[in-house]
Image: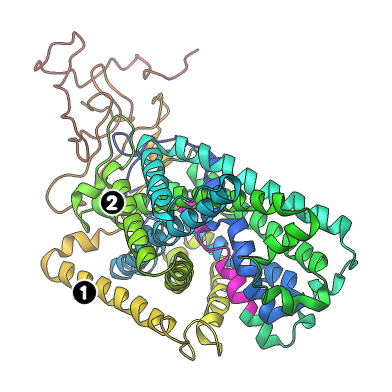
Amino acid sequence: MTTNKEGAPAVGAGATHSRAVGGLRAGAIGGLAAGIMAAAFSAPSTSMFFNSPFAALHAGKAMPAAFLVSAIAIGFVAFNIASFSSKLPSSGYAYTFVSHGLGPKAGFVSAWMTLLVFMGTPIIVPPYFGTTLSNLIASLTGVRIHWAILALLLLAFVGTLAVLGISDSLKVSGVFVVIELGAVAAFAIYMLVKSPHGQAPAAFSPTSAPSIGAFALAMIFCVLSFQGFESAATLGEETSRARVTVPRALLGAIVVTGLFYTFTSYAAVVGWGSNDMDKYAGDTSNSSPWITLAQNYAGSWLADVFAAVVAAGLLAGTIAGVNASARMLYAMGREGVLPSALGVANPRTRTPVFASLVAVVIGGLGGVISGLVWSPLQVWGFFGSIIGLGAVFVYIMVSLGVIPFFRREHPQEFSVLKHAVVPIVAIAILLIPLLIKNGLIWPLPAWPYNLVPYLALAWLVVGGAIVAYLQAKRPELLERAGRIVVDEEAASPPCAAEPVAVAAVDGSSTNGSRTPSYRRPRPAMSTTSDGCEDWAGHWGPPVRPVNSFARAPAPRTPRGRPGARPRSTRPADRPCRGTATG
């Protein structure tokens, strides 16, 4: 097990390090791409269009203040996730983080709830995407295409991108995120300039809300608008310099989306009129008061542009949701707590193909079927409420896990402010929507929303039952939950040209049946005491291929004769290959 500079363990006991050779593609993306995924999952334009009326219903003209305070509040949660990401970069997110902080049982339950949150996006988005695009096409051409057909085309497109690779997926997401943010922000600036109502500086004061309780209720919908930013934490095995870039991506996404929500909500207050926000919240003339604003300030053509912007945002959100879901399934399947087929990465594209297809099929088809039974808007509201409740649970578990993890594993780095006060503040804020009257669960809303807390609890119980089964039948799997992380220092000795996999440094098995390892470009042979490769092999322990479609090639010798005995030593005066010499 590696240690940090102070000698404390770098990860939890029995950790396994991986640099994704033969698994996910190491260094496939940079920090900017990870930030794009975090922002795309939140679907900023869609959240502003459809969540802001509920925020205005409670906060009135103080809606921008509610978004600003919510951005600060969710920033505490993002800081906790970033703290974990800086030490445990992995595709497992809550599965890895909570396992190291609160134990493997809590880690599995948190991961189980995270699957509900991430896979909920392919459920709620396709019906709404199909409806929005169908209405847009009908408005432009007079031809009505059933929304289900467009939803299925969306799923096919997103599934193809997920299979091709994370880099291609996030390039497409990046284009659509820039389009949606740019279009809405540009119109917001236009409203600020052209509005006949004048500016409203009181909109940034929480005291402008009818009451503190009403302001807190508005914050529920504002906080939910950020949900999904944590998806960047699932890219730890594919992001270059993940310990640095992923935390920056998480915090950067909160800053960008927080400024976007605050600015555009203020523009809505100014454009609509600060004294008429009750009409903004109750506008039924269009699908969103933003469509009404577009018609009033620019005409129906801009309403069509905004429909296209919403569709673009929903597409980007679906791509991010499928990628995040696939990596959670991959991380859990790789360690054997879910079917091992989910933990297989294609050796050519280095993507979790089967896990991606499962996320698309189960989530997407579930959404289409639900949309045919109910309306797409009902699917959005009902399943969105379940997702929001699940996200709050996961945020609380991750924040709670920060305290014991840093206190136990990194005592020299432990800070009362960063690793105790910040998590406690985050948890206190997250409990508001759960405990406040007329919040998410108390008192129970009307049918069918009164089923939301019970369905979320039922999902949690199923996860607990799986934990009980693993504890009774396969305890070795449970004990190693979330133990595969990226260790960039251990994976890149001075003589290595690129990071390589370092699997099972403690010699244990992560799936209970075979030695955990990853397929390499060349087989690892013998190793010298200084960690450098010899004449015949690579630095690192010999490993067998796992989670790969191919067998390892036969051992090679300096002359390339398969089966011959390799040299296990090198001349003492010969420098390590790849090491600069004078």
Q: Nearer the viewer, residue 23 or 490?
A: 23
Of helix, strand and loop, which one carries label 1?
Answer: helix
- Pick the residue in front: 12 or 134: 134
Place of residue 150 in the rendered image (x, y in percent of width and height, measured from the top left):
43, 49
Magenta part, dominant SS = helix
Image x and y of residue 578, in percent: 41, 19
Residue 237, position as x, y percentages in the image: 40, 43
**Image point (16%, 65%), residue name:** 475
Helix, strand or loop at mark 2: helix
Question: Residue lying furthest front in this view?
Answer: 142
Q: Which one is earlier in the sequence, the residue at label 1 or at label 2?
A: 2
Circle 1: residue type? Ala
- Which residue type carries mark 2? Val
Instruction: From the viewer's perspective, tell me whether residue 31 is left or right of residue 193.
Output: left
Determine whether, in the image, residue 236 is placed left or right of residue 454.
right
Q: Nearer the viewer, residue 491 or 284?
A: 284
In the image, residue 373 sits, relative to residue 505, either above or below, namely: below
Looking at the image, is mark 1 or mark 2 nearer the viewer? 2
Is residue 348 in view from this perspective?
A: yes
Q: Which residue is mark 2?
A: 358
Label disc, if present, on residue 465 of the rendered structure: 1
Residue at the far top in the pictured view = 559
Q: Residue at x 49, y 91 (%)?
A: 443
Query: Which residue is nearer to you in this view: 555 or 378?
Result: 378
> Which residue extends farthest left?
563
Residue at image position (56%, 61%) is: 78
Q: Residue at point 47% right, 58% down?
A: 84
| Span of residues in magenta | 218-233
